[in-house]
Amino acid sequence: MSGKYEYSVQNWYHGMSPRECRVWTAFIQKFPDRFDSVDYNVRVGSGSIAPEPFEQQYPGLWKLLTQKRIDAVGWNEDIPTIVEVKDEARSTALGELITYSTLYKETFSINFDVPLLLVCVLVDPDLVSLFAERNVEVVEVEADLRGLRV
C-alpha cells in the first residue's frame, strides 16, 4: 500500500497549520528519503453522534468533523508510520500519538504495532524518556516560525 501524495516539499499540507507546515517542510528537507509516499489529515475513529437536526441537514458531516485526525501517515512499501507534527512537543502530543495508534489499528484493521513519529522544533526535556518508553521516535528540526500565529 502507499500514500496518495508524493513525499516532497509542498507549499501546503492538507490539515496542517502554517506553523506545522514549516516544521514538516524542514523535516522533509532534512530527511528527503524517509518515506516513499504520504497521506495527510487521516481520519480515524468513529466520531460522535450528531444532534438530530444537524444529521438530517448534513448527513455524515458530523462524523467527519468529530473524527480524530492524524497529521500524516508516511509509507515505506506496506509499512505505515503515524506522524504528529508540532512546533513544541508537550504531553498532549504523546496522548495524541497513543490515541491515534489505537484508533488507526481499529479503523484500518491493522494487527501490528504501527511506528510512531513526532516531528517538532522543541521537545519538553521532561518528556523525552516518556516518548522513548512508548516507542515514539522524536525528531527535532530547525524551522523559522517567526511571524506565524499559533
Image (tube, grey):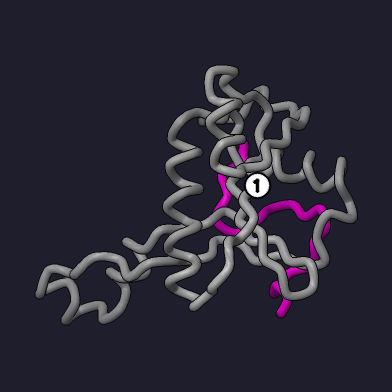
Given residues 134 and 62, the one toward you in this image is 134
Q: Amino acid at mark 1?
A: Leu
Magenta-colored segment: predominant secondary structure: loop
Compared with residue 119, is residue 5 higher up or lower down, i.e. above or below?
Answer: below
Q: Which residue is mark 1?
A: 117
Residue name at image x 26 percent, y 81 percent: 59
Dot 1: within a 10 Å radius of its alpha carbon, few (fewer than 14), some, or many (20 or more) residues?
A: many
- Horizontal placement of 35 versus 128: left or right? right
Asked if residue 78 lies in the magenta stretch, the reply is: no
* Residue 145, position as x, y percentages in the image: 67, 27
Given residues 57 and 47, the one toward you in this image is 47
* Residue 79, position as x, y percentages in the image: 71, 68
Compared with residue 10, is residue 26 higher up or lower down, i.e. above or below?
Answer: above
Identify the element where label 1 is drawn. Answer: strand
Whether residue 57 is visible, yes or no, is yes
Residue name at image x 50 percent, y 28 percent: 90
Asked if residue 16 lies in the magenta stretch, the reply is: yes
Q: Residue furthest top?
A: 125
* Residue 136, position as x, y percentages in the image: 61, 43
The part of the chain drawn in magenta is 1-20
